[in-house]
Image (cartoon, helix red, strand yellow):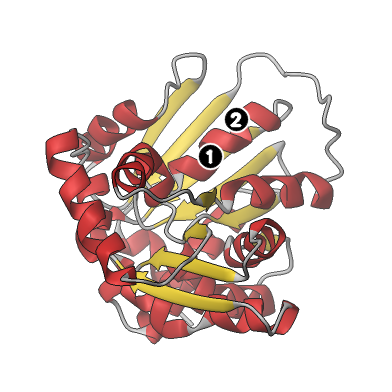
Amino acid sequence: MKKNLIGFYDSGVGGLSVLKVALNKIKNKNFAFFADTARMPYGAKTPSEIRQFSIEAMGFLKDLNVELSIIACNTATSYGLSATRKIYDYPILGVVDPGAENAIERTKNKKIGLVATKATVKSGFYEKKIKKLDPEITLKSVYCPDLTIAVEQGRFKREYIDPIVKKYLDEFEDFDYDTLILGCTHYPIVEFSFKRVLKEMGREVLFVDPAYKTVLDAMDELKIPFDNEEIPNRTIDFYITGDIDLFKFTMKKIVDLSDFTLKFHQVSNENLIKYIK
């Protein structure tokens, strides 16, 4: 029997940017968040590894009797969404399609920038989706490994984070993009840094955080009205494969969850073996 529960999955804290949007829009559900911190960063993994990790996570959440799961990770969406949908018979959403669709809606000059992990960029998933919807759009992608790690470690001070962001934005050189996809769920957490750096560069750019449209798609899938009433004593269960204390440390810098009942659970490799395909 399905519980009143929505699942989220990411390699680390990045998916909290998606959960944060869901908490504001979906008030009649509880949440389960699977963070595979023991095996992050996913951007450095092989496609087959990422696919297997995704299958394990979606199986784990299915056994919690979630109604729907969101792969709140662009890399895992790129390599794992199709495979998990073939294996499991419940709704699974990713973040790449919503991000690509939103970017197409926002761009005026048909030039879009993408910042993401190396694995997401190499997958070509965003480019294929965007070209399919609008062949006239030009997409330029930059992968940002140091930024993902900085966010995971909670290193948000201006003097540390801004130089990292600038280093990657400089790689766009003279590409005149008017829209920038934050194509790793870690990156919206430091959108403030992107805004600061781009302002200093004299650039006006529209940002795309795939989380918003992804959550709206989840609401549509589950037929959740916009005026859904908040249920009492909302809970969030976190299932962590790595260091729970480190996850908590960074989480507290990202999102205020003081209004929710929180539970943290350690997940071992033994808990995931049965999902290996």
* Snapshot quadrant of residue 6: top right
Q: Amino acid at mark 2?
A: Leu
User: Percent from the top left, x then y, of residue 115?
Assistant: 39, 64
Q: Classify 31 as above or below 1.
A: above
Q: Can see residue 63? A: no
Q: Residue at x 49, y 84 (%)?
A: 124
Give the Cα separation between the discs numbered 1 and 2: 6 Å
Residues packed near mark 2 inside 10 Å, few (<14), some (14 to 19) or many (20 plus):
some
Query: Farthest residue toward the left?
Result: 159
Q: Look at the numbered disc 2 and give the secondary structure of its residue.
A: helix
Residues packed near mark 1 inside 10 Å, few (<14), some (14 to 19) or many (20 plus):
many
User: Percent from the top left, x then y, of residue 82?
Assistant: 62, 79
Q: Look at the numbered disc 1 and give the secondary structure of its residue.
A: helix
User: Percent from the top left, x then y, of residue 17?
Assistant: 47, 42
Q: State if disc 2 and disc 1 touch (CB < 8 Å).
A: yes
Using the image, tell me which numbered label, if any, was put on residue 19. 1
Q: Classify 123 as above or below 70.
A: below
Left of 197 or right of it: where is 47? right
| Residue at image mark 2 | 23
Q: Residue at x 58, y 54 (%)?
A: 210
Q: Amino acid at mark 1?
A: Leu
Q: Can see residue 170? A: yes
Q: Residue at x 73, y 68 (%)?
A: 89
